Amino acid sequence: MGINVDDVVVPGDVIQVPNENDKAKFILGPGLRRHADQILVTTSGVLRKKASNVYWVDCHRKRYVPVKGETVLGVVVNKSGDTFKVDIGSSEQASLSYLAFEGATKKNRPDIKIGDVVFAKLLEASRDMEPELVCVDSFGKRGKLGLLQEDGFIFTCSLNLIRKILNPKCTLLKLFGSEIPYDVAVGMNGKIWLKTKSIKESIGIGSAILAAEHLPNEEIIGMCNRVINNLKGM
Amino acid sequence: MCKVPPSWVLHYQIQAYKKMHTINDIYKQPEQQIFIPRNNRTTPQHQQTRQREESNARLHNGYSTHRRRNALHTTTTTTTTMCFMKRSKEKAQREQDAEESQAMFSDVITEDMKRGVCKYIIEPSFVPCENLTDGRLSFHGMNPEIERIMQLEQEANRLKVDVKEKDVSDFEMADRYSTLVGTVNRRFSTKRDHRNLQECDSEQRTKKMKFLKPSCD
């Protein structure tokens, strides 16, 4: 019995990919592993497929494993010499060089204190080394990365919820944005930073994001509208 | 010249063979055995190397240069600390470093990638799989800087869609050609027309250059 796309899979399952032409390449996302000529599942979840050759396993997970190139939200916990230690929720704290900020030089150090929140990109995420963060792109520009303002609210959620709300099909963040002024930073490590004009709005949007975990996209729209109406009515 | 006991010859043969086929070659042909006994070497490549080794052996009193160099891995450290062995020692060190770095990046650069026959590409991140957006958003002027970048991105996306449909839009094309009308017209006009045109221009020029009396006195 073969495994189809959108089936529930468990570790050890073997996936048969269509083998029409040998030239075609397959992209194996998270949760899949190649062993000899077989593709094995390594996490339990739902098998997903995109554009005929991209496969991955959609799983429920709370522990973040750093992956190179992802943007994460971290809290500066230590300052030691040239680097900051940043807690990104992974097994090891990430390091962030003081030179990895826009316009930073040896003389002109960025003004960062312990407890500050940064939105950064993972430059290095190797098995054996500590993850390394940067707050600039390859051109030395800040872009969307960098230090976040102090008056925000941080909360943690599961990694699959993050993927759900960052999916282009999910309109949750935009729906709130059309009615309520707010600033948000969503890290792939399951941390969300939120800044609004009042505490009520922060609580409203925050709990709406957390409630979206077990709702399909259509119900999310209705739930958002209810929250917006309540907030406006107050 | 350092003499090497005959019991080490087997080791030297292995080392010399590794030397000839650089590390990349070994990865390209993983199924090939690294060590092949001397009397079994039949392929032209092996014959060639055998000849080379033999000629080297004649030159160097029974030990080929390859062998001598690779003997360093096993010779006592006292020899390597000698002054004249310095370069060889550095080389051995470099090789060891390269091996270590290869082991370190084995999860990034797989052996299949080196072989160039990899059918599967491993993507450890969900972001490209699900086309996730980067989660930094701002609305209604809460963070003008982020909103400006969001707007630029939106425009870039729209342009990308436009470009997919047509390289140059109809309006741009029409604008471009309307500026060319005069230039192309002149090309087909006679000399008399040219002169008329120039006179016209000169009249305009004199008109422009005319002195205007200041009115404020």
Image (cartoon, coloured by chain):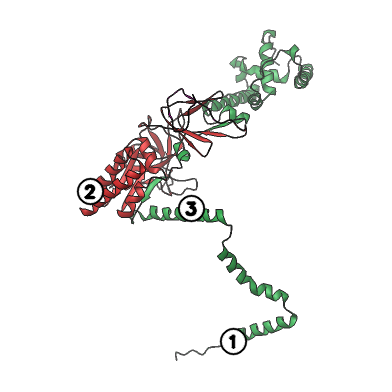
The rendered magenta stretch, by its main secondary structure, is classed as loop
- Mark 3 Cα-neighbour bin, 10 Å: few <14, some 14–19, many ≥20: few
Mark 2 lies on residue = A200
Q: Chain of mark 3?
A: B
Image height of B206 relative to B63, above or below: below
Quarter of the rendering occupied by the C terminus of chain B: bottom left
Query: Which chain has been coloured red in this picture?
Result: A
Q: Chain of mark 1?
A: B
Asked whether disc 2 touches disc 1, contact meaning CB atoms under 8 Å apart, the reply is no
Mark 3 lies on residue = B157
- Is A16 contained in the magenta span? yes
Using the image, tell me which numbered label, if any, was put on residue B207: 1
The tint chain B carries is: green
- Disc 1 secondary structure class: helix
Q: Chain of mark 2?
A: A
Q: Position of residue A218 (x, y in %)?
A: 35, 45
Using the image, tell me which numbered label, if any, was put on residue B172: none
**Is the same chain shared between marks 2 and 1?**
no
**Is the same chain shared between marks 1 and 3?**
yes
Give the magenta range: A1-18
Furthest residue in direction left, as rendered: A234
**Viewer-side residue, A145 vs B139:** B139
- Is B126 contained in the magenta span? no
Image quadrant where residue B95 sits: top right
Type of amino acid under label 3: Asn
